[in-house]
Image (cartoon, rainbow, N blue to C red):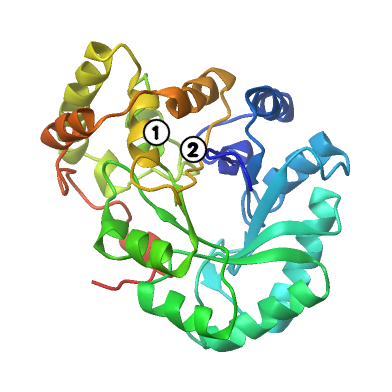
Amino acid sequence: MVSEIGLGCWSFAGAYGPTDEAESHATLKTALDLGIDFLDTANVYGMGVSEKTIGSFIKGDTNKFTIATKAGIYRDPETQTRGFNNSREHLTAELDKSLKHLGVDHVALYYIHRRDPRHEIEDVMETMLRFKEQGKIGGIGFSEISTGSLRRACDVGPVMAVQNEYSLWSRYPDLGMVRTCKELGVAFVPFSPLGRGVFGTKVPDPTTFSEGDFRYNTPRFTEPNFSRNVAKVAEFKALAADLGTTSITLAMAWCLARGEHLLPIPGTRSSEHLRECAASSEFPMTDEIMAKIDEVLPVGWAFGDRYTRLQWLGAEGYC
């Protein structure tokens, strides 16, 4: 059992702008103060930077947080080309490296970050079950997989969580994944529940994005799509203000209201924003408010795709 809101730690590695260890540690301290005890990271977040930042904060104390990390994506250090590897050898080496970065001998949840089509999911499950037997991981997870792959994996052994992008402007999981996870008793972990900052209190400025920023050249953040998206989000922010809250809190409250098995992991390096996220747990959501949100931001309202063609590689489709 973990807090119903977790903390995504990709931003600790500069995914959405420059940061440093002190700022990240301050955010982790705020998380503890707020009762947020679920952290999500990955081996490729800054090529170990995010994991090391968490490790230097917890200093081997596994009672502070429940930690999830991932493997399956790799980058060529010279060309920065992204590829996928779900082989037992690769996953074993990456898990051991992640444990070293974190300064622990066990993580509560270990995800396959992206599926490698060269390896059947049943074989990958056998690898992950071996990690459980060895005491290196507590549970098995998958990211950006299809409902069919999830069912195949569950036929081999228990899957603890599925992590896919899900927010008011990324509703693909509503086409089966949210329901399938509930049916199978699997936690659904929405990443980017704040739309990579678009539902933040400050409007992102794409002209300031560096090539290292994940949003750089992403269709929803390029014109003419971006201006149209900002205009729609402005209507949502006005609704939040009328309700006496912020767009961050309302967007997170909407996510929590989609099902008790959802555990959203907003990614932030700001203590202030994390407090606004945590406030969603206390927001008095009603069916009437959910209906108003749906009027302002109906399914499929966003302009542009959530990924570029290259970013889509590795994410499984199912509809």
At mark 2, the secondary structure is loop
Residue named by callout 1: 252
Q: Counting other residues with Cα less than 10 Å from the Cα at mark 2, is it few (<14), some (14-19), or many (20 or more)?
A: many
Picture quarter with the C terminus: bottom left
- Decide which of 228, 177 is in the foreground and name it: 177
59 relative to 186 in the view: left or right: right
Rendered image: mark on residue 266: 2
Which residue is rendered at x = 61% and y = 81% of the image?
125
Amino acid on which disc 1 is placed? Met
At mark 1, the secondary structure is helix
Q: Quadrant of residue 138?
A: bottom right
Q: Say if residue 204 shows up in the picture.
A: no
Mark 2 in CB contact with mark 1 (< 8 angstroms): yes
Amino acid on which disc 2 is placed? Pro
Which residue is rendered at x = 51% and y = 84% of the image?
155
- Decide which of 125, 8 is in the foreground and name it: 125
Picture coordinates of residue 111 (x, y %)?
A: 60, 64
Earlier residue among tags 2 and 1: 1
Q: Nearer the viewer, mark 2 or mark 1?
A: 1
Q: Quadrant of residue 70?
A: bottom right
Relative to 307, does residue 84 appear above or below in the rendering? below
85 relative to 56 in the view: left or right: left
Which residue is rendered at x = 70% and y = 28% of the image?
32
Picture coordinates of residue 277 (x, y %)?
A: 47, 27
